[in-house]
Amino acid sequence: MQALEIVRYPDPVLRQPAKPVERFDAELQELVARMKHTMVHSDGVGLAAPQVGISLRVLVLSEDGTPEKARALINPKVSLSGPKDRETEGCLSFPGIYAEIERPDRIRIEAVDEHGQPQVFEADGWVARIVQHEYDHLEGRLFIDRMSSADRVRIKRDLEHLREEWQAARA
């Protein structure tokens, strides 16, 4: 299976709220399978459809980065709770950029899988962080939006470099 191309910052699709999935068909199942493959192939633990240039409310995650643990959450609704925690995050759309991000440590998720089967569960710690990061992508939010001012200053040159690469690829 061929991996999908990961969209990099500042591609506009990353800032657009994704559209709900309406059809649960073979095309959706193929997208989910390719997203899981791309995530694992890229050494990621989460991937949202906008990160592969598709504005749909689809995310995949694998808490340990293996295909065996990979699952899909489609049209997710996330309720936040619990104390907040700061951990280092990175993003496949921002290669080489990492920062500590504060997020609630516990969440409740309501979604469906690629076959339309309901998925309702609570998550904490690492899994909660992955889901929140990918859910942000579905909302058009990026992890740089949640960084401290000091981290934004620290990565300014890295972001400029990504912008230059993105513009050069379109010239």
Image (cartoon, grey):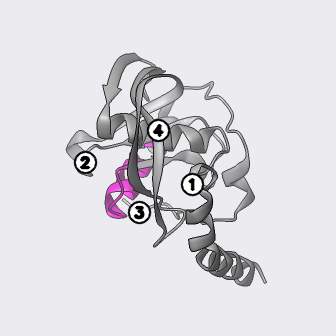
> What SS does tag 3 mark?
loop
Q: Which mark is residue 119?
A: none
Tell me: 105 left or right of 138: left
Answer whether residue 48 is visible to the viewer in this image.
yes
> Residue flagged by tag 2: what amino acid is it?
Pro
- Mark 3 or mark 1: name the one nearer the start of the chain: 3
Q: Position of residue 40 (x, y in %)?
A: 32, 56
Q: Which residue is mark 2?
A: 67
- State the residue in front, 158 or 15: 158
- Distance from label 4 to label 2 (Cα)? 26 Å
Q: CA distance from mark 1 to mark 4?
A: 11 Å
Q: Secondary structure at mark 2?
A: helix
Q: Secondary structure at mark 4?
A: strand
Residue 7 visible in this rendered orientation of the protein: no
Identify the image quadrant of residue 60.
Answer: top left
Q: Is residue 43 magenta?
A: yes
User: Which of these two is toward me, 147 or 70?
Assistant: 147
Tell me which numbered mark, 3 or 4, is placed earlier along the sequence.
Answer: 3
Q: Which is closer to the viewer, label 3 or label 2?
A: 2
Q: CA distance from mark 3 to mark 2?
A: 15 Å
* Residue denoted by label 4: 103
Label 2 CA crowd tier, 10 Å (few <14, some 14–19, many 20+): some
Place of residue 66 in the rendered image (x, y in percent of width and height, measured from the top left):
23, 50
- Residue in the picture at 63% in, 24% down: 22
Q: CA distance from mark 3 to mark 4?
A: 33 Å
The residue depicted at 70 percent of the width and 75 percent of the height is: 163
For label 1, count other residues whose C-alpha is less than 10 Å away and answer few (under 14), some (14-19) or many (20+).
some
**Which residue corresponds to mark 3?**
2
Q: Which residues are magenta?
A: 31-45
| Residue 4 belongs to magenta span | no
The kind of residue on which mark 4 rests is Arg
